[in-house]
Amino acid sequence: ARTVLLAGRRAPSDDASRCIERIEAAGCRVRVVPLDVADAAAVEAFLSEHARSGLPPVDGVVHSAAHLDDAVLADATWE
């Protein structure tokens, strides 16, 4: 990918920001967007704005969210 959109409710951490800088240094354009993907109206507004931005269209989505609550794997549940 030559252009990557990173959407999240919070700004990237310092570690993530350093990773973004390395990706950009490799020639990829990275756009960080404050967005809660659970808010359908906000997602629609973002996609409308993005379509007018001149950036390439969104061709794929990877939803990657996690909540870590340390536990023994054998005791882990889907909740």
Image (cartoon, rainbow, N blue to C red):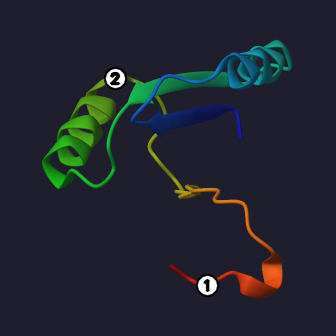
Residue 62, located in which quarter of the rendered image?
A: bottom right
Q: Position of residue 53 (x, y in %)?
A: 34, 23
In this rendering, which labeled residue sits more in front, label 2 or label 1?
1
Find disc 2 in the rendering and name its residue.
53
> Which residue corresponds to the image point at 32% horizontal and 43% vertical from the top-left?
36
Find disc 1 in the rendering and name its residue.
77
Q: Secondary structure at mark 1?
A: loop
Q: Nearer the viewer, residue 22 or 29?
A: 22
Amino acid at dot 2: Ser
> Which residue corresponds to the image point at 45% horizontal and 37% vertical from the top-left?
8
Badge 1 density bin: few <14, some 14–19, many ≥20, Cα 10 Å: few
Answer above or below: position of 62 versus 12: below
* Left or right of 23 on screen, residue 17: left
Badge 2 density bin: few <14, some 14–19, many ≥20, Cα 10 Å: few
- Quarter the N terminus occupies: top right
> Which residue corresponds to the image point at 72% horizontal and 22% vertical from the top-left?
20
> Which residue corresponds to the image point at 49% horizontal and 22% vertical from the top-left?
11
Q: Secondary structure at mark 2?
A: loop
Gap in Å between the C-alphas at discs 2 and 1? 43 Å
